[in-house]
Amino acid sequence: MTSGADHEFGNLSTDLKLSLVEGYLKAFTSALRSKFPELWYIDAFAGTGERTVKTKAVPALNFLPAIEEKIERRRGSARIALDVSPCFDRIVFMDKKRKHCAALETLKAEFPAREIDIVRGDANAAILAELSSTRWVGKRAVMFLDPYGMDVAWSTLEAIRRTEAIDVWYLVSLAGLFRQASHDPKNLTARKRAAITRMLGTDEWESEWYRFTPPVADLISTIDETHLRIADVDAMEQFVGKRLKALFPAVLPPRRLRSDRGVPSFSLFLAISNPEPKAIGLATKIGNHILKART
Ligand SMILES: C[S@@+](CC[C@H](N)C(=O)[O-])C[C@H]1O[C@@H](n2cnc3c(N)ncnc32)[C@H](O)[C@@H]1O
């Protein structure tokens, strides 16, 4: 049975996502440990430190025996970051759910000698508060943005970019964009428009993703105007990539993540805020190696 503190989320590609980020965290601290006095990890959608994976029971059928329900608890991003060696000097966990923050406090208690801060609240506000109170000299950080949906505001990414010290792994919800950008623009409400614009930091997506065909009249009839979304999920991913590249000095080709039914659901991007060629070179080398190596 699952308990009240269980955090069930994700699918098969969640393991891939977490293994990519873990690979980067390990390589990051190994490469920079001797070069920077302080290495930080900021997990802005931290969860509980654990992921509960439930496999449904299957009743016996013909000659096949019944299979019992299976409940597994796997490491979430918070615990993964705490396990990284060489270790981070400071870790900040953020989550808006009280129950998740309580679970993170329990996790923190396992590591009394480590500097771990837990912030409860909306990630955008928490990130802005954290970044505005930090001097980045002598520090480098990795941030993980792992929302369920379209929670990250463009202004948050701008603040991250300004630090010139953070490498950010950003899970972009393609499913969220696809849902909000209704195929028929009659269903594109002001609220949906605002959600997409807040995430992408521009309203230019609308003219790129929709085509308006004016009405055509001949002697017999008038063919109605059409105005439909022409962008598919690839075009949306490309648009996000273009936006990120316009903001960050370097952005790696993303890793597409799919639902268990094979539907594209997320794109995992790595963006580097430090404009120095050496920093970009190192982050790109590690990131590309990890992104290409793991399937
Ligand atoms: C996909 S889960 C993160 C999983 C986590 N990275 C892990 O691997 O265990 C998303 C988390 O973000 C939290 N969350 C959702 N919206 C948020 C927001 N606006 N600000 C901060 N946390 C939020 C949820 O409570 C949830 O714990």
Image (cartoon, grey):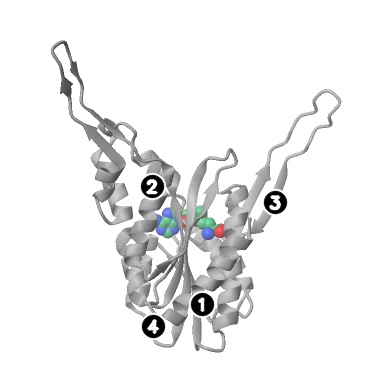
Q: Is 51 or 231 nearer to us in this picture?
A: 231
Q: Is mark 4 within 8 Å of ligand 1?
A: no
Q: Is residue 55 left or right of residue 185?
A: right
Count of labels in the image: 4
Quarter of image, res 24: bottom right
Instruction: Please state the horizontal and vertical placement of residue 117, each as a whole percent of the image.
Output: 48, 73
C-alpha distance separating marks 4 and 3: 39 Å
Instruction: Please state the horizontal and vertical placement of residue 190, each as a whole percent of the image.
Output: 23, 41
Instruction: Please state the horizontal and vertical placement of residue 1, each as a whole percent of the image.
Output: 68, 45
Say which label, 1 or 3, has the lower sequence index: 3
User: Is there CB contact under 8 Å for labels 1 and 3?
Assistant: no
Which residue corresponds to mark 1? 282
Give SS at disc 2.
helix
User: Does 126 sit above or below residue 89?
Assistant: above
Quadrant where the C terminus is found in the figure: bottom right
The three-letter amino acid code for the residue at tag 4 is Trp
C-alpha distance separating marks 3 and 2: 34 Å
C-alpha distance separating marks 1 and 3: 36 Å
Q: Please tell me whether mark 3 or mark 2 is closer to you in this view.
A: 2
C-alpha distance separating marks 2 and 4: 33 Å
Density class for disc 3 (Cα within 10 Å; few <14, some 14-19, many ≥20) is: few
The three-letter amino acid code for the residue at tag 2 is Met
The three-letter amino acid code for the residue at tag 3 is Glu
Q: Please tell me whether mark 4 or mark 3 is closer to you in this view.
A: 4
Picture residue at 31% right of the left edge, 67% below the top: 158
Q: Can residue 38 be seen in this view?
A: yes
Which residue corresponds to mark 3? 72
Which residue corresponds to mark 4? 136
Picture residue at 57% right of the left edge, 81% below the top: 31
Say which label, 1 or 4, has the lower sequence index: 4
